[in-house]
């Protein structure tokens, strides 16, 4: 079974989307699957890449939520892929999407998942399942925390569920999760992180509030 | 000031807006826009401005100076077109990285005090009912995140249908 894991983050490294895909990959490697890893960082796809993708039975997208939707470069890739798919007859492909956001609540990814579902309909593909992940900003800093432990407890449950569906080529209701970590603490940690980051760039804390 | 973000071709734009637009900044696609790279530089390196210094690097500032935003976009899967979405992705310096709880959910805090009314017109020949529902929910979600009001959301089949309706 050929499965494509597609990282839709524009970041070269340390993206939450990559963290999610690396954790998911472990659950998909348990059978005789061939896993292809793609990274859509630019707003264009090559014909070769699109040809490789349509050979897969499952396309698994992981991407960050941008302004309530899909990052524009990924959206452009999806539009190119739609045009390519419409030239083909064979389209027994299921689509799964894992969307993470910096907000605490996983359900804030709902519309991005809905847009992916609408893309599937337009492209003649089958929808598998979506997972909306809240507090995604934490994930890169939790690389050393084993999945299923501490703040990554809910993540394990959701990834096992979607992995099971990918392996069986089944569809199921979308699920929405957040970190096993209080919202107030997440907010505090995130804001402290912004203060540290701006100082690391040689600016002052008050510069976070600059206006033009 | 009004801010008009659109993805229309020049000839279609002239059809809809044959006269000079007063007090309106128009954001068009000249084929040079760079996509957001997710660096958060607009919050922590060059606060309130995008680090990518193309023609679209000051979208946050433009938003801060407008009272009305008008978006004309081809409907893509119930959302904006890649160009319009790109402009919106490049506009997050308008808001502040800190969080507030709004409607029981986490959202970003305001950076500016101005109030914006948002008007959105989606166009396209084959917009499905499901896509319309997604589009409406998307604009509402955008209005919560930008902390602005929606004056209208419309869906039209053709550019011609838009004539005389936008302003």
Image (cartoon, coloured by chain):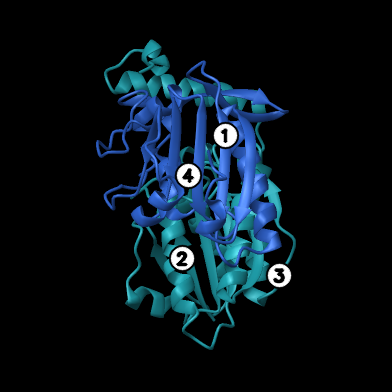
Residue labelled with disc 3: A171
3D distance between C-alphas at marks 1 and 3: 37 Å
Chain for mark 3? Answer: A
Local crowd size for mark 3, using a 10 Å CA cut-off: few (<14), some (14–19), many (≥20): some
Query: Same subunit under labels 3 and 4?
Result: yes
Near-viewer residue (B31 or A69): B31
Local crowd size for mark 4, using a 10 Å CA cut-off: few (<14), some (14–19), many (≥20): few
3D distance between C-alphas at marks 2 and 1: 26 Å
Mark 2 and mark 3 lie on one chain; the one further toward the N terminus is: 2
Chain for mark 2? Answer: A
From this viewpoint, which residue is outermost toward the bottom? A89
3D distance between C-alphas at marks 3 and 4: 29 Å
**What hue does chain B carry in this figure?**
blue
Residue labelled with disc 4: A143
Query: Same subunit under labels 4 and 2?
Result: yes
Instruction: Mark 3 vs mark 4: give the one in front.
Output: 3
Q: Position of residue A21 (x, y in %)?
A: 50, 58
- Which residue is located at x 26 percent, y 18 percent? A202
Query: Same subunit under labels 1 and 3?
Result: no
Marks 2 and 1 in Cβ contact (< 8 Å): no
| Residue B118 circle label | 1
- Which residue is located at x 36 percent, y 29 percent? B42
Q: Is residue B90 above or below residue A53?
A: above
Q: Position of residue A209 (x, y in %)?
A: 42, 15
* Quarter of the view holding residue A121: bottom right
| Residue A79 circle label | 2
**What hue does chain A carry in this figure?**
cyan
- Which residue is located at x 74 percent, y 65 percent? A172
């Amino acid at each position: 079974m050929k499965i494509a894991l597609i990282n839709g983050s524009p970041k070269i490294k340390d993206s939450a989307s990559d963290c999610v895909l690396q954790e998911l990959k472990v659950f998909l490697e348990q059978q005789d699957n061939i896993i292809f890893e793609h990274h859509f960082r630019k707003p264009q796809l090559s014909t070769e890449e699109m040809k490789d993708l349509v050979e897969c039975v499952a396309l698994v997208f992981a991407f960050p939520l941008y302004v309530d939707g899909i990052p524009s470069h990924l959206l452009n890739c999806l539009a190119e892929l739609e045009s390519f798919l419409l030239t083909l007859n064979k389209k027994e492909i299921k689509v799964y999407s894992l969307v993470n956001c910096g907000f605490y609540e996983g359900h804030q990814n709902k519309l991005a998942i809905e847009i992916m579902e609408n893309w599937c309909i337009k492209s003649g593909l089958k929808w598998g399942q979506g997972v909306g992940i809240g507090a995604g900003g934490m994930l890169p800093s939790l690389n050393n925390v084993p999945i299923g432990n501490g703040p990554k407890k809910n993540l394990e449950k959701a990834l096992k569920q979607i992995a099971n569906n990918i392996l069986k080529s089944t569809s199921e209701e979308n699920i929405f999760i957040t970190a096993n970590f209080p919202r107030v603490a997440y907010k505090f940690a995130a804001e402290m992180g912004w203060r540290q980051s701006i100082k690391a760039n040689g600016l002052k804390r008050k510069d976070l509030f600059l206006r033009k | 000031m009004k801010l008009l973000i659109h993805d229309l071709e020049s000839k279609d734009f002239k059809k809809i807006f044959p006269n000079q637009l007063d007090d309106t900044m128009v954001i068009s696609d000249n084929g040079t826009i760079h996509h957001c790279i997710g660096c958060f530089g607009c919050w922590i390196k060059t606060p309130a401005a995008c680090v990518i210094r193309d023609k679209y690097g000051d979208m946050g500032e433009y938003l801060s100076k407008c009272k009305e935003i008008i978006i004309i976009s081809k409907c893509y899967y119930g959302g904006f077109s890649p160009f319009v979405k790109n402009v919106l992705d490049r506009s997050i310096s308008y808001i502040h990285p800190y969080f507030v709880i709004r409607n029981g959910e986490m959202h970003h805090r305001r950076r500016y005090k101005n109030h914006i009314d948002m008007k959105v017109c989606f166009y396209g020949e084959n917009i499905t009912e499901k896509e319309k529902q997604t589009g409406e929910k998307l604009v509402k979600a955008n209005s919560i995140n930008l902390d602005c009001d929606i004056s209208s959301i419309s869906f039209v089949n053709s550019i011609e249908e838009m004539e005389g309706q936008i302003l």
